[in-house]
Image (tube, rainbow, N blue to C red):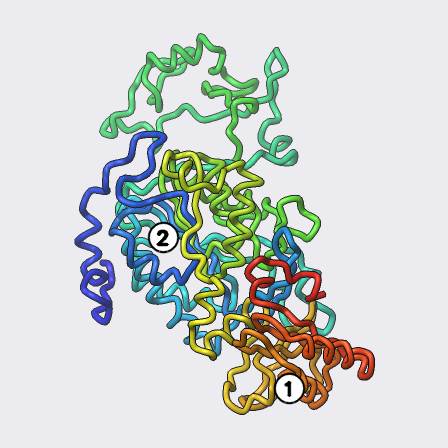
Amino acid sequence: MRRKDVSYPPHVASRAARLKEDAPATEPAGRASALLDTRVVYCGDCLEQLKKLPEHCVDLIYIDPPFNSNRNYEVFWGETKEKRAFQDRHESTQAYIDFMRPRCVELGRVLKPTGSFYYHCDWHASHYVKVMLDQIFGENNFINEVVWKRQTSHNDAKQGSKHFGRLHDVLLFYCGGSEAYTWNQQYVPLDQSYIESHYSQADERGRRFQWGDLRAPGGAAPSKGNPHYTVLGVDGYWRYTQEKMEQFIREGRVAIPPGGEVPRYKRFLDESKGLPVGSVWDDINPINSQAKESRGYPTQKPLPLLERIIQTSSNENDIVLDAFCGCGTALVAAQKLKRQWIGIDVSPTACRVMAKRLRDVCGLPEDESLWKNGRGFVVRGLPWTEEKLRAIPPFEFENWAVIALGGIPNKTKVGDKGIDGRIFPVGAEPAPFKEHELALQERWYPIQVKQKDKVGRPDIDQFETAMRRSRREKGFFVAFDYTEDALREIDRFFKDDHAVIAPLTVREILDEQIARKLV
């Protein structure tokens, strides 16, 4: 019996009853859904965007949300090689679950009864995520825990470590509640050792085959409806009708093996689909920095992984949703496989990266008029212009600027000693630090933000003092513009103190022209 969680909203608690309803009719091939727009990338929090979607409108959902892994990545993204930080941390596992729960509730609401849901996670929180998803989707709707081997042992288990190498991610797979959920069995090629051991026979034409059983399953039992007749002189109960058996004999597929007594069926190697894909996927390699499809995104998943999921759990023109779509691998796979798709991500940079990828890899134009005619895609919600940024509260502006640079905002907004955030260079790991403290031994660069039309020399003087106090040789300053006195002081600071202040304008950030100053 499906468990109910009375603490959930009524539309979730009553999900079991609603799942019995028929799914919406499938759209004709080549048409987008009449219920919602597809081929759209939404920039923003998926919780807010999902609330705008109608119930039971999506055929397949895949999400790869930031893991609760307390890691910080810094990478180069996009055409301009903009240096970005992808922060992937929560205060605790409970904070991570609390963040994901309302979003998964909304994902469950928009999933069709015949749909499928995949949650991609790693060892840090997978067990807690499974409990949460059982409550939302129902224990009986859990189909598989899929293990994807994403790396080899030398990547994780180092000399002196006291744990087994952590080599895999987990995909938690749920159906939408109907037994008629989409399922297209996928296969992997047979390896040579399997062929040698199982297809050891060859016919007169050299076609390799293995012998298959023709006897009725469960033995000779007339009560089970097994047909009874004679095959090649052998009387018995068989698993096929007599007409079908005679067809097999004419095709040369039935014979009595040498030394045998019972007719058997020839299963030819060249007709084999391969081995059905199981719950352990060790045949899909992870992305490395040299891979052609790499976009520099720290948690980018390989295209074949998403293609397998989409091919298994959707059909052409079905709607695929990725609510944490990062650099857009699920969207690219869906487009290539002729599915409709919707992408959501909170990062404007990620949305720009995936838009470029859709243009370059899929040849899909980003054009409003073409999109309306079913031949392009659009990005919605890229929020910031200079005008809007001038109008938002100062602390919000600080957060925007620091995050736009790939930094970590300083939690202390008052008395921050002239430092609004920090950037960690490639490979640096930020150690835990207490409120009101900045660790001096770490390798990091300070960020100062001023919501001013023009920053003057006094502002630069204050930042120089903050850099000396924290013993930093490089820092970043963000404003709308700078006075000549401010820029001269930055030059003097470099000549006399051998320290660098990179003055960045809001326009440069919006136009993604900051890479040359971040390196």
Above or below — where is 113 with respect to 121? Answer: above
| Location of residue 348 with respect to 379 vertically, above or below | below
- Of residues 66 and 380, the one nearer the viewer is 380
Local secondary structure at mark 1: helix
Mark 1 lies on residue = 458
**Crowd rating for badge 2 (residues with CA inside 10 Å; few <14, some 14–19, many 20+):** many
Count how many numbered circles sit on residues in the image: 2
**Picture coordinates of residue 79 (x, y %)?**
63, 51
Alpha-carbon distance for marks 1 and 2? 59 Å
Taking the view exactly as shown, the residue that stands out farthest to the front is 484
In the rendered view, would you say 410 is above or below 303?
A: below
Q: Secondary structure at mark 2?
A: strand
State the quadrant of the C terminus: bottom right
Amino acid type of the residue tagged 1 in the rendering:
Pro
Image-based side of 54 in relation to 305, left or right: left
Side of 35 relative to 189 (left or right):
left
Percent across and percent down for residue 175 are 33, 49
